Amino acid sequence: MKFSEIDIPANILKALEKMGYDEMTPIQEATYPVIFAGQDLCALAETGSGKTAACAIPLIQKVDPALNAIQGLVLVPTRELCMQYVAEIQKIAAHTAVIPYAVYGGFDKKIQMDTIKQGIHILVATPGRLIDLLYEGILSFAQVKCAILDEADELLKVGFLEDIEFIMSCILHEHQTLLFSATMPDDIKKLAHDCLRDPQHISLITERAAPESIEHYFAYVHPKQKHAELIRYLAGEDVNQAIIFCNARHVVDTLFHSIRKDLKDIDYIHAGLFQDKRSSIIRKFRSGRLRYLIASDVAGKGLDFSNVSHVINWNFPRDGEQYTHRTGRTGRMGRKGKAFTFVSKHDLPGLRKLLRSRKITPCWIGKDPLCENNTHQEQKTQRRKSPSRPYPAKGKKKTE
């Protein structure tokens, strides 16, 4: 369905056309009538499916610009997602009088307080900074019509459950609550039960946890061989932009300093950097001035990088949810993408669980460690017969 086929005001439709939004994504088509009707919603949808616009379009329509008060409240887990979310609202509301604003840690609180006092309509926030401002006494939720919990699984994973419960308790009147998540563990089900009132449940990933737009490649290598294998893999791929994920800040630092001589237009990001630095790197990556970004999971939680063709797991993800969030940086909005994950011997139990739980059909580059017919002798013979790397030549179709 096209946006022009539903009852969207002309000024919002004009902004959507300028953004290149024509066809509604499945999550937008499924949730728009529910949100617009004022019903509570618990939605499970894959990352990169268009959830932000699914919320923002009807939310903007609900706002009365003449009322100088916060009417929409959005909670997100990270500063980067906070800035991304408010930027999306600003674009959609460009031809309206609706004023969105974002508050998050690492930025001058006095400036944020002064802006709020001047008047805003939609507040996007990380829980910690929002609670700080609540204690300052400058926030009023008396006119909030709709509260949104986005990336709810990540909000809970980083320990915001008590903060969310406190914030929601500050909205004393009846209001609409929307909960969006890429996964639905038990604690999310409990949160939905506690915060939502007779919600509609929509799930677009019941039958498949891994987006069909992403191809999943794996390589079984010794940790000491990973550097060389990564360079060979990237040389054989048509990479537009790639994010290389590591499990810890110090690994990000180490990998960046060891690999920057091999790759051009590369930088790194993790939570240990100052906010201004992180924001600058994200802007450079979004604008295409960087081709490669080495990152901790600060870049794996809902951030929208529309030109990422490849996601690489330098370290094997800790669980299926982390894998889903990381690989969701590519293959967004129906585009094709590739995920490439290094696997070592101690990762095999986690790999089996990942493939089973996420219903992933793996494409192996080189040896398949899960193949029972791969005896030690056969592996040695294969290596002697095929000394060249098993990666396809750039521009040629891979064969399985």
Image (cartoon, rainbow, N blue to C red):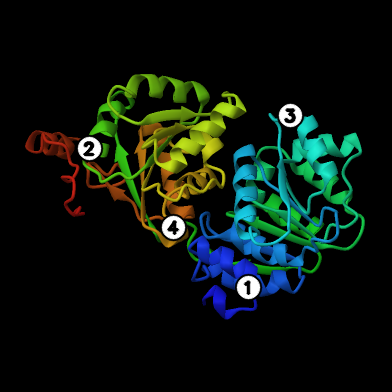
Give the residue type at disc 1. Ala
In the image, residue 43 sits, relative to residue 374, either above or below, namely: below
Which residue is tagged 4? 359
Which amino acid, by three-letter code, is at mark 3?
Asp
Residue matched to label 3: 108
Q: Is residue 232 left or right of residue 284?
A: left
**Mark 2 to mark 4: distance in Å?**
29 Å
Residue ID at (49%, 32%): 281
Question: Cα distance, mark 1 to mark 3?
Answer: 37 Å
Q: Which residue is mark 2?
A: 235
Taking 386 as reference, is 39 left or right? right
Up/down of 299 relative to 372, above or below: above
Disc 3 or 4, which lies upstream in sequence? 3
Classify mark 4: residues with Cα within 10 Å, few (<14), some (14-19) or many (20+). some
Q: Helix, strand, or loop for circle 4?
A: loop
Q: Quadrant of the C terminus?
A: bottom left
- Against 315, residue 2 (above or below) is below
Of the residues under marks 4 and 1, which one precedes in the sequence? Answer: 1
Mark 3 → mark 4, Cα distance in angstroms: 45 Å
**Of labels 2 and 4, the one closer to you:** 2
Question: Which mark is in front, 2 or 3?
Answer: 3
Residue 184 visible in the picture: no
